[in-house]
Image (cartoon, helix red, strand yellow):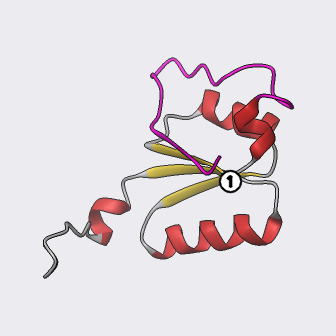
Amino acid sequence: MTAEGGCVKSAAAAVNMRILIVEDEPDLLRSLAQALREAGYAVDTANNGEDGLFNADSYDYDAIVLVLLSFVTGKSSPRQPTNPAGPSPCLSTH
């Protein structure tokens, strides 16, 4: 617990979590991935919707961060991920 009453995850707990980041802007993708890795998360990245869907279908992620607008709106990706393990929590910026 922090002094403000919030919970803080330990790096040991984070290291078991796998996160996918989908973002088409290379600098932002690199920055987000680096920050999460430094916090102890296992991070996979995709720089387009097609690769993001492939990864989401292929692996069981604890969370998916979608920053790529065309992936979120479906304009460049004709379908949603269909991982048989079930849906992963998803954070979208749009």
Among all residues in the image, which is located at the extreme front? 94
Q: Residue at x 81, y 54 (%)?
A: 24
- Compared to residue 67, the image places residue 2 above or below, namely below
**Residue 82 point in image, percent of width and height:** 60, 19
Q: In the figure, is residue 24 to the left or right of 61?
A: right
In the rendered image, which quarter is residue 13 located in?
bottom left
Q: Nearer the viewer, residue 43 or 70?
A: 70
Q: Residue at x 54, y 74 (%)?
A: 35
Q: Amino acid at mark 1?
A: Thr
Which segment is the magenta one?
A: 74-94
For label 1, the residue is 45
Among all residues in the image, which is located at the extreme bottom? 3
Marks counted in the figure total 1
Is 75 within the magenta?
A: yes
Q: In the figure, is residue 32 to the left or right of 29?
A: left
**Residue 29 point in image, percent of width and height:** 71, 64
Among all residues in the image, which is located at the extreme right? 76
- Compared to residue 74, the image places residue 24 above or below, namely below
Looking at the figure, which quarter contains the N terminus?
Answer: bottom left
Q: Considering the numbered disc 1 on the image, is that residue within a helix, a strand or a loop?
A: strand
Q: Nearer the viewer, residue 41 or 29?
A: 29
Is 38 within the magenta?
A: no
Q: Residue at x 66, y 22 (%)?
A: 80
Q: In the figure, is residue 25 to the left or right of 28?
A: right
- Pointer 1 local density, CA inside 10 Å: few below 14, some 14–19, many at least 20: many
What secondary structure characterizes most of the magenta part?
loop
**Residue 87 point in image, percent of width and height:** 47, 26
